[in-house]
Amino acid sequence: MAFRATLVLFLAALICGLADRPVAAQDADDPFADLNAAAPEPAPAAKQPMSLAEAKEMVASLFGQEIARVQQTTDPADDLALSQTLLTAAQGADQDRTVVAVLSRYVAELAANGAEGWPTVQTALGLLGKTAPDQVADTLGEVVDTLQRRYNMLRGDERTAVAGVLLDAIVAQADTSMLRDNSDAALALYRRAFAMAGQIRPETRDAIKPKMNEAVERQRVTQKIDLLKNKLKANSKDTVAARELILAYVTDLDQPDEARKYTFLVDDAELAENLRRAYTPLDTLEEDDAFRLGEWYRSLSTSVAGDVPRARMLTHASNAYQRYLELHTAEDLYATRVKLSLKQIEESLNRLGAPVPIYASNVAGVATLARRGEWVDLLNNASLDSPLTRYFAKSANGVISDGAKGYQDGVKFVVPVVFDGDYDLEMTLAKSSGPYVWMFLPLSADGSRYVGLSLVQIDRGGLYKIDGFRVKDRENPTVKPTPIRDGMVNKLAIGVRQRDGSATITVTVDGVKWIDWSGPAASIEGSGSATPQFVSLYTHNAVVEVRSLRARAVSGTIAEAPKPTADEVADADQRPGKSDRPGKPGKLSKLEKHNPAAHLSPKAQQVFENWETYSNKQKLQLLDAMRSGSAEDRELMRLIQKHYRF
């Protein structure tokens, strides 16, 4: 054991010297201490990380003999012990990210040799997701293989324990495959998990079945898009295939921004205009654009196949029509016609079992969104352009944080609606990396009281604060190991109730009760001058994707929030400007105004400058290459989309 401790100290000391600066400390004890504080300035460029070969050589030189020794024994105890030693080294401050990735893979593979090692596996996968996310899926595959071998050789209680962990690992591997758009692999894994769940944990089949259905649908869409792309590569003048491809991105994937990249293949100005409208933030559309967008989406709903895409098109049509009525205040035939369309859309959505959207505008004043018993689609009502939201962007499935791209604080997604009474929340969350994810849950309509919910704080979670106890305190009765895992998609159901000075907060994850707390409302210490009055998600150096978010008024109402006050906007704006945001275009320099691609490599500049000279077939090939290429490739694709006709 002394030998291992010495190795840990030596490795930690060695890799600590690889970075130029210490990592900014995160106040894990009080993550809500200053929600509106300015995000730190972008860190100076770190030293170039080691190559994979160098990192493997370093780890092998320090731990190779120990790893080989424990792998030759049949007792899993020494594997688990060594995995903890390597995990300690990987979690040391200021590591080289490539070294951490190599260590994390060894940790996961060693800890998978016993059911009790699963929390260590998950911690290692979290580190790997942060340092080398492209390796998570392969590592999970190795973990599943190891657990399957253990399961096959064990009997009795040990076999039962490993079976539960194996099931979780298979679902995690399937979720990761879905995040990587590998629906074929995901479907096979979900089916395997579904069959296994029927034998050992039947209650989890209800959570797996929707994931299987999603994988089947994604598989169908992927095959359809690949077929259309192949047609266009063979014949770039096939306008029928081009139109089908464009509409597939809109109806099947809900990605009008991606669809716009192929409009150069068809000569249809109206289609291009509708895609422009669909890509434009709804609350900035003019009256005529909103009406035409509603008409277009409704027409698409009549021709699309499948209940899910049909409901999606009807939802977009409803929102566009409501935006139109917000601007068109005259009670004339046009307004009557749109209101009739909205009523018909509501009836269609009810038949499909989909929530009826309520468009929340930015107009001053408060409008009721939902009364008792009614569900509201909060994700659809949230605005990414709000000054209260920072560092979240639209994704293919919803909205995604970019908190792990350089900023460690102030990453938040705010839903500007007011809860006056008890309420329920339902959220689908996909977490790919990061150590801290919290939520704010309002307890009063004026924002003076709230409860903090830590979904992920390293390896645990709970309510914050309860009788003064934080998530790290053992005396906090709500703190438990977190079920939110990297690479998995989780469905959360949250209930907030208050009566006669008491409060009840419940949190269910994937159908399993996680937190169930009741007590005096005064026990919850969430109040102060900087309290959040809205439901919000807050992350630290994490990447999470919110795929769905809706709320139901159990008592009272859910209302639209007024526009932020000047003080609120000023507080929210105490952060770097848009040009400082990672991944966001900002103000252009004089050179960039003359040549928008001036900051790219000479090869990328040449592609940008010569874009109009390429044939349609060449453009398709280049777009495909850029989409799956480096960060510079994606930036080049953004510039081409912005400066050339799409």
Image: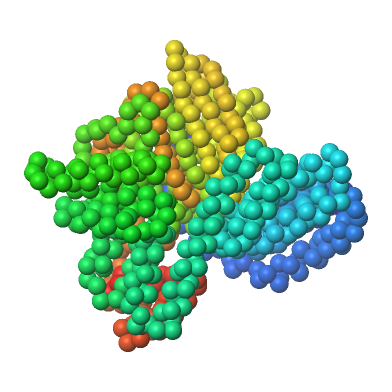
Q: Position of residue 4 (x, y in %)?
A: 84, 52
212 sits left or right of 637 in the view: right
Residue 464 rendering spot, x and y as whole percentages? 53, 30
Residue ID at (48%, 72%) = 226
**502 in relation to 309, above or below:** above
Within the image, what quadrant is residue 61 found in? bottom right
- Relative image position of residue 270 (x, y in whole percent): 22, 67
Residue 235 visible (yes or no): yes
Q: Is residue 149 above or below residue 271?
A: above
Which residue is found at the position 50% from the left and 63% from the top? 220
Determine whether, in the image, residue 645 is placed left or right of residue 127: left
- Foreground of the two, 96 or 70: 70
At x 41%, y 79%, the residue is: 232
Q: Nearer the viewer, residue 157 or 599?
A: 157
- Position of the C terminus by quadrant: bottom left
Task: Return the residue nearer the eye: 243 or 498.
Answer: 243
Regarding residue 393, the answer to whether it shows in the image is: no
Percent across and percent down for residue 533 are: 37, 32
Report the side of 37 relative to 587 (left or right): right
Asked whether 435 or 333 is in front, the reply is 333
Find residue 50 and report its image quarter.
bottom right
- The image shows a total of numbered marks equal to 0
